[in-house]
Amino acid sequence: MNKRNALKINVLITFQKFKTFGKLYIVGILCLIIYAFSDITTTPTPFVVPEGWAKPVYDFSKNPLTKEGFELGRHLFYDPILSRDNTISCASCHLQATGFTHGDHELSHGIDGKIGTRNSMTIMNVAWSKNFMWDGGVNHLDVQPLAPLSNVVEMDETLDHVVNKLNTSQKYKILFFKAFGDSLATGQKTLLAFSQFTLQLNSYNSKYDKYIRQEVGGEFTAQEINGLQLFRTHCASCHTEPLFTNNNFENNGLPVDTSLNDFGRFKITHNPSDSLKFKVPTLRNIQFSFPYMHDGRFKKLRDVINHYVSTDKLKKPIVLTSNEKVDLVAFLLTLTDNEFLFDRRFGFPRE
Amino acid sequence: MYKWIRLYFISITLLCASVQVFAQSFNLHIAPVFGKERIVEDKWYVSRNGDSVQFDNVRFYLSNIEFENEKGATFTDARKAHLIDIFEPSTLKIPFQNIDYQGIKKIKFNIGIDSTNSVLGALGGDLDPQKGMYWAWQSGYINMKIEGRSPQCKNRKNAFQFHMGGYMQPFYAMRTLELPIKGIFTEGVTLTMDLYKFFEKININTQNSIMIPSKEAMQLADLSIQMFSINK
């Protein structure tokens, strides 16, 4: 077969292919032109970095915040559809009034009344956190929801199954369409929506913040000023301002609870030097986030302070008189941010 | 104005797509076998150690696939990663466009997902955590899952579950493979995955479960790459 014939056959095959694909293509082109002129718009929500705070860790360029994304995330956060038997939502263990933790429970409980091994963490100012959970096992905010979702004593579900449930819901079809311009839910979009919500749960309007910014309502008493000074001397190396955490893992000297045998960070790194290290939690809204510590062993702030003055495991021992302890607690109460705890935007979404 | 720009980009994409439809493609085929037999779901196979094994879930990530020709030119995959499911035929063929396949001498790829992509949060497509190849309480992709049954597994359901992963040192379980390609292939090459070789070195009696990044996961990852070879 000579070259010219081969070329002819090639042209013919191409033509045949075009006949098959051609019609589909024209329909496709028309659809895309319609899409190009349709109006799918989202409302960007600028992320506020409070004055004097560091740059957030979260990369917003990959998940730009929008009003619609936030609303979708908010609905998901409060919806028990996330659990195997539709009984447990994120809010079951993360209540706004307590700084999004599980108030008054040493160990948080989940599906079928089962009890976990740790006290749920608060959710605040998460854009500044580079890892999550008491042991830091979760490396990115987006993938954090996978942990409670799949834990057999929390929600006992799979992301795949949740996505299937969402895709049969008319309500979520609309919410996903508004947020992403496509009504189909996927694992990725579901996780991004969670981040949209939790990234906006930011607390920076406590009395302490107003004191720092020298605003009305931020007038400290002599006791609170003394408490702040004591705090800066004894506590701030781990509970660093303004986030009130250094985002590291530390061993604060708590003896192991032998009924739990939780060695914290060690479980993730297998490094003996990480044994009994836990993530330093923020102290914001600490007035309402009791009980304290990873296993919720202390009910009162007084118990926490008594632990720190009595342990011999700290690099620098803390010595406080009983008056100083009272002043320190008075300061800690200035970290309460009522604007945050009662912000209607963060609450249960009314239809 | 914005709409016209959008339209412009859509047209460009469309044009590229139509060019690709008509271009000849070169395929990487994945052939899962057990010794000389093609692997079928629920069929029993006998390992070299005499263990009977049956598979119900074998999935793994092939990432950063790259072909190299004799001149040293490389042809990279447009997609970052592919989730291969040995019981899902649509995943067993990866097409490559615009490859000068005449002088292909080498293929390079990763089994698993690299550390960079393990810390990027929620990704989509084959990397969507929805696929069930992502860990929950300790983040990171599961590079490979080999699940099935064997009467020799002395546990509750006589089941084996190998979940190999880990992206942090010293338990970084992704493996890079470079395999020579000998001969001339015009339609594509076949990457054989021989599970016989994996079970050859395993005492399934006691070694039948791995779920976390660890020293053992590292050893199994080393073993897993011995399954792969390039065939005609």
Image (cartoon, coloured by chain):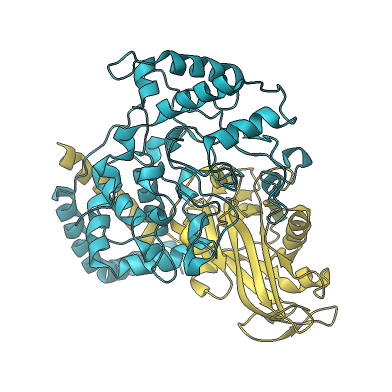
**Is B202 or B62 nearer to us in this picture?**
B202
User: Looking at this view, is A185 or A226 the one in front?
Assistant: A226
Quadrant including the C terminus of chain A: bottom left
Task: Identify the image quadrant of residue A303.
Answer: top right
- Residue B41 locus on image (x, y percent): 60, 82
Q: Compare residues B200 and B1 and report the one nearer the observer.
A: B200
Residue at horizontal 74 percent and vertical 31 percent from the top: A313
Q: Colour of chain A?
A: cyan
Task: Determine the residue positioned at 24% across, 47% down.
Answer: A68
Q: Write the residue at 45% across / 46% down.
A: A101
| Residue B163, horizontal then vertical, whole percent | 66, 63
Question: As drawn, which residue projects farthest toward the bottom?
Answer: B43
Asked if one can make out residue B55 in the rendered structure from this viewpoint, the answer is yes
Q: Is residue B50 above or below residue A226?
A: below
Colour in which chain B is shown? yellow
Left of B220 or right of it: where is A147? Answer: left
